[in-house]
Amino acid sequence: MALAAEQTIQGQLKASLEILSRPIANDTSRRLQLLVSIFRVIVATTIVIAAAVYTDPPLLGTRHPNLFFFTASVYAALAWMTMIYQSRAADSHRMLAPLQLIIDIICVTIMLHASGGISSGLGSLLVVFVGAASLTLRSQQTFLAAAICALAILGEQLASYLMGLSPANAFIPAGVLGAIIFTIALAANPLARRLQESEALAHQRGIDLANMAQLNEYIIQHLRESIVVVDELGSIRLINQSAAKHLGASTRKTGQSLISLSPDLHRIILNWRRAGGSSSAPENFVSADGSTQIDAFIAPLERDGDGPVLIFLEDASLLAEKVQQTKLAALGRLSASIAHEIRNPVGAISHAGQLLQESTGVDEYEQRLLDIIGQNSKRVSEIVDNVLQLSRREPTSPRLISLSTWIEEFADEFASTLELPPNTFQIRSTDSLEVRMDPSHLRQICWNLCENAVQYGGATDAEHHVAITYGRLPGTRRPFLEIADRGPGIPASMRDQLFEPFATGRVGGTGLGLFISRELCECNRAALIFEPHDGGGSIFRIVFADPKRWESMS
């Protein structure tokens, strides 16, 4: 079931990434019309400059220089105006295409007449403009424009002939030019139809791709799973809201480097790639706000493990809580039996050992055996007491505690009780704050954590052997209390079972200290998190509930 869901999400993400990487088709007609407008501006501007520079003798406008220069100037101004407007307005080409062609026909025809008629060669510009317009206009508009253009050329030739400015044989090139314009319009018609169909199809596909991309984005953002997609360069290609919260990202902006956002997750991915992408077991790290243990499940999006990867982020505390609740239920059922079946016999054994110690004639070997009986009887009694304490689950009595005062008093009491040097603790504070918790529970938790740090955290005569830090977490601003040591640390093989009952890595330990500490934290709406210390050692962080939020919930 979980595998099928993972494969479905992977397929969906592959489709999303392909869609997001495709550019939506540009409007071909608009780009073509813009190119023609640029060509028109260049031609019109060149004609104006040529008419202004070459005046004696005139290069253009030999018949009517003033009319030619005025028409060319108006034509250039209109060309610049339409090009600027077209470059800014998205749908302007549909409205401007017919208007521009009418301006082309009128202005070029007048400049043709002012330059001596068809022999000036300016009529070839109409071939270019009509041919380009044929690709963007409908068939009826194209043929109408070609007819108007041909009539304008013939009309100019007729006017020149009637005014005695052109010979009769000039009608032949004028007719040929008109025929060429019609031929160009007819030839461009099928191409224009295909171009318009391709444009409509591309436009529809662009809309479909955009809609599908939005749908995929909606699905991904509303998944209960926290997911991140990272490419082969270590950049975030996709991230949903819940994953951004775990990683401490203020926005879901893609393209951000993962190492700058979460160095721990980046390290996990590198280790996974070095292992050839064969490791399926999740690795965990602490969330950006330091309040949650996160399990990272990595799945490749391509066969090559060096390509993009899909990462599922899961709150490890939720799964651990379910497992612990199951174990607690089993412990509750066993607690009554343990009280009767184990406590009474152990008490009898311990009492018999004490009576034997009081008798005379006990040699050294027998005394050693009696010590073993006493030590193990005491250990079994502690296990029974701890299990019974968990099964009873007495209600908490939370109070508002000033951490600065409480920690100073606790450190003095702990050091004097265990006869430790006065500089054993290094107390650091980032903020003065109050927390709401049962004082007896907080004392029991800290006593257990500090006792472990003193016993297994290195040399007990070292200065600042145990560091106690308290303040507020960045991001969530929840109060926290850390107890850290500089010992050898906890082996990686033990970390997954660290808070499980009866899990211990030392001789003589019950394996219930950390389990009870976490349970007491949860009773007070707090969380107990382990994190390896950089450079060696262990950090145990208590993340308290916000006192104001506690009051509002109560």
Image (cartoon, rainbow, N blue to C red):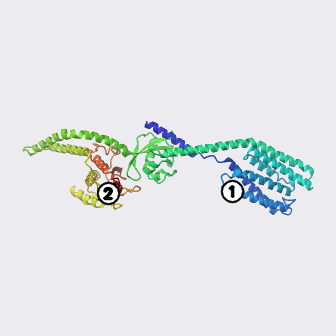
Q: Where in the figure is residue 79, as x and y percent of width and height?
A: 74, 57
Who is closer to the viewer here, 391 or 427? Answer: 391
Q: Secondary structure at mark 1?
A: helix
Q: Which mark is residue 516?
A: none
Q: Does residue 21 appear left or right of residue 88 in this picture?
A: left
Give me the C-alpha separation between circle 2 and circle 1: 65 Å
Q: Where in the figure is residue 401, as x and y percent of width and height?
A: 29, 58
Q: Does residue 285 appear left or right of residue 439 in this picture?
A: right
Q: Where in the figure is residue 139, as x and y percent of width and height?
A: 75, 44
Q: Using the rendered view, name the quadrant where residue 493 is placed.
A: top left
Q: Where in the figure is residue 107, as x and y percent of width and height?
A: 80, 56
User: Which residue carries the number 1 mark?
Assistant: 85
Quadrant of image for the N terminus: top left
Depicted 280 relative to depicted 522: above or below? above
Which badge, 2 or 1, comes first in the chain's sequence? 1
The residue depicted at 22 percent of the width and 40 percent of the height is 336
Q: Using the rendered view, name the quadrant where residue 483 is placed.
A: bottom left
Q: Secondary structure at mark 2?
A: strand
Depicted 172 relative to depicted 472: above or below? above
Whether residue 349 is visible here, answered yes or no, is yes
Q: Amino acid at mark 1?
A: Tyr
Who is closer to the viewer here, 471 or 520? Answer: 520
Depicted 308 relative to depicted 461: above or below? above
Whether residue 507 is visible here, answered yes or no, is no
Q: Amino acid at mark 2?
A: Val
Q: Does residue 320 appear left or right of residue 128 in this picture?
A: left
User: Which residue carries the number 2 mark?
Assistant: 435
